[in-house]
Image (tube, rainbow, N blue to C red):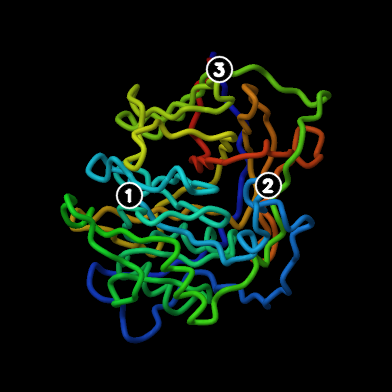
């Protein structure tokens, strides 16, 4: 059965910058919309220090949930497969890059791993994502325009292999540019040395049981057709009580374990997508970077426990949580466990079965 969701009109406030494939300009490039400034917000303690704020799961050591999250940019074209370390991430965000491909932002807090990659270049959407998770962005360069924004218009910590930052290594058996990897232990060590280590400033996500009065439907399988050659399918597995991920009908596997990628929650967020204006050129084929507006609100679908629940999402900028609401306007809770976030264009129609 096809499911077509109503779309919200949203106002773009994400920052833009002109660029060329060359190095970032030495003088500031005017942006179409002035970048808002934000005042640092005092740390918000986790209500229960023994609960991971990104998964709702019990953690043996409260210190695990009080570190600075790490956001690793990971490639997702076929030459990046199989990716390593995804299964240890608390949250994975998937977004369109250009040419119909997607990339991942893998967020680590309560678990770590020593071989995460391949680490790839940043995109414009990494600006709001880094603020949403109040994390350390780990990436391998970016196009000139994106680098200029990261260098001049953001204040979150980053490790960039292109500028010689520590925390990266080359994995054996991988070919450049798919051979750069990182590990969480080393990144958190660097964060400690540089004074970046602190608890998350944003409030924790909301976890809990579903309200039986909220409209929801059974959904054993949901497909997200990002592009004709990039169809992501999540299938509910009763035995594991998780959703299993496939791409174009084939399971996508974790390199470290050989197991199929899975998630307890799959959260689909509709957001405005458009070519960056002024244009940001991403590669030698003159592909334009996408501007994805997350400083906004829109439609959402949550997959959990074998059900599909429609709702809304909203994010009001740094220091606020990414909020989810059910059809009655009440908070929509996630199930305890790992979450995979799928950011999709306003016009995309998911397919349910």
Q: Residues within 10 Å of mark 3 (few under 14, many from 20)?
A: some
What residue is at 49 percent from the left and 47 percent from the top?
93
Q: Is residue 321 left or right of residue 73?
A: right
Estimate the spatial distance between the alpha carbons at disc 2 and disc 1, rounded to whole Å: 30 Å
Tell me: 248 left or right of 345.
left
Q: Quadrant location of the N terminus?
A: top right
Please rate how many residues cluster around mark 2, counting C-alpha atoms within 10 Å: few if below 14, some from 14 to 19, many from 20.
some
- How many numbered circles are shown? 3
Write the residue at 30% across / 70% down. Answer: 161
* Residue 58 tag number: 2
**Counting residues from the N terminus, which is met first, the one under dot 2 or under dot 1?**
2
The percent position of residue 237, horizontal first and vertical second, equals 53, 20
Q: Earlier in the sequence, mark 1 or mark 3?
A: 1
Spatial separation of the CA atoms under disc 3 and disc 2: 28 Å
Mark 2 lies on a secondary structure that is loop
**CB atoms at circles 2 and 1 under 8 Å apart?**
no
Q: Does residue 16 lie above or below 350 as drawn?
A: below
């Amino acid at each position: 059965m096809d499911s077509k969701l109503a779309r919200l009109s949203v106002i773009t406030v994400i920052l833009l910058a002109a660029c060329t494939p060359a190095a970032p300009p030495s003088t500031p490039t005017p942006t179409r919309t002035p970048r808002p400034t934000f005042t640092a917000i005092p740390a918000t303690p986790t209500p229960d220090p023994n609960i991971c704020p990104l998964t709702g799961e019990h953690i043996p050591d409260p210190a695990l949930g009080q570190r600075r999250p790490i956001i690793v940019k990971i490639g997702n074209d076929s030459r990046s497969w199989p990716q390593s370390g995804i299964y240890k991430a608390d949250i994975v965000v998937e977004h369109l890059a250009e040419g119909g491909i997607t990339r991942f932002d893998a967020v680590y807090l309560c678990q770590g791993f020593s071989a995460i990659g391949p680490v790839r270049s940043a995109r414009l959407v990494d600006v709001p994502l880094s603020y949403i998770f109040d994390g350390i962005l780990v990436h391998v360069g970016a196009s000139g325009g994106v680098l200029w924004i990261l260098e001049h218009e953001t204040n979150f910590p980053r490790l960039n292999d292109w500028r010689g930052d520590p925390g990266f290594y080359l994995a054996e058996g991988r070919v450049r540019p798919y051979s750069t990897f990182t590990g969480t232990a080393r990144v958190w060590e660097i964060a400690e040395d540089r004074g970046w280590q602190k608890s998350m400033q944003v409030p924790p996500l909301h976890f809990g049981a579903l309200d039986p009065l909220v409209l929801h439907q059974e959904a054993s399988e949901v497909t997200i057709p990002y592009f004709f050659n990039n169809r992501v399918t999540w299938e509910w597995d009763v035995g594991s009580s998780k959703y299993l991920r496939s791409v174009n009908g084939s399971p996508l596997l974790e390199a470290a374990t050989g197991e199929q990628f899975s998630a307890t929650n799959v959260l689909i967020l509709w957001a405005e997508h458009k070519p960056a204006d002024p244009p940001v050129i991403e590669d030698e084929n003159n592909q334009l970077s996408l501007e994805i507006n997350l400083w906004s609100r829109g439609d959402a679908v949550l997959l959990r426990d074998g059900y599909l629940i429609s709702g809304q999402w909203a994010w009001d900028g740094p220091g606020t949580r990414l909020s989810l609401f059910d059809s009655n306007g009440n908070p929509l809770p996630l199930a305890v466990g790992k979450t995979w976030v799928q950011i999709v264009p306003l016009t995309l129609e998911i397919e349910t079965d």
